[in-house]
Image: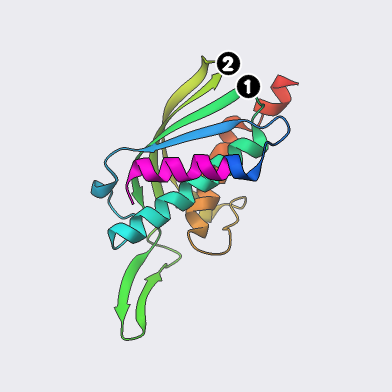
Amino acid sequence: MHFRSIVGWAALAACVAGPAVAAGSAEVRYQQPERFFDAGETPRERDDNLRALTDRLQSLAVQNLPADQTLQVEVLDVDLAGYVRHTQRGDLRVVRDDHDSARIWLRYTLLSNGQALRSGDAALSDLASRKSPGLDHERGPLGREKALLASWFTKEFGAARAAAN
């Protein structure tokens, strides 16, 4: 599945889910995902992982941004936590506590009614967060990466809804 398909499916899912009260939105794009450091072992796994990251960012925007705000995110690179170990029982992603942190590089712009409120680049990593409390890893696939996005979102845009009221 290609990037355009990921965006199309995410938009369709948002429409099917129905409108949320005072919900912002997120538009997520990926810059040359086939060149990402480690977004998955195969093109299909990469597409599934990027779809999950897109879903997480869109969910954060819907839950936390005012209705008139849109977060545009361009993901520049992804390095999933851990490494893949090939075993007789199948592939297994191994994550050691002191190594192999999740990393995501992105560029973003927060818009309100089409006007840019703020923009910037971010290099996200959970390496520093493991030494201090506050970043709880989510359960399930890409738990570290989803928690990393949630932590960044809260730090960067946490006051967005309060400022709009």
Asked if residue 37 lies left or right of residue 92, the reply is: left
Percent position (x, y) of residue 64? 66, 35
Q: Is residue 7 above or below residue 40?
A: above
Mark linked to residue 34: none
Residue found at x 44% / y 37% = 28
Q: Secondary structure at mark 1?
A: loop
Q: Amino acid at mark 1?
A: Asp
Asked if residue 27 lies left or right of residue 61, the reply is: left
What's the magenta bit mostly, secondary-structure-wise?
A: helix
Percent position (x, y) of residue 7? 43, 40
Span colored in magenta = 1-14
Quadrant for the C terminus in the image: top right
Residue 8 among those drawn in magenta: yes
Residue found at x 57% / y 58% = 137
Residue 5 among those drawn in magenta: yes
The residue identified by callout 1 is 68
Residue found at x 31% / y 55% = 38
Tell me if I can see residue 154 in this picture. no
Q: Is residue 82 above or below residue 18?
A: below
Asked if residue 115 lies left or right of residue 46, the reply is: right
Query: Dot 1, how many residues are within 10 Å of its Cα: few (below 14), some (14-19), or many (20+)?
Result: some
Rendered image quadrant of residue 14 = top right
Percent position (x, y) of residue 120? 43, 25
Q: Is residue 17 above or below residue 94?
A: above
The residue identified by callout 2 is 113
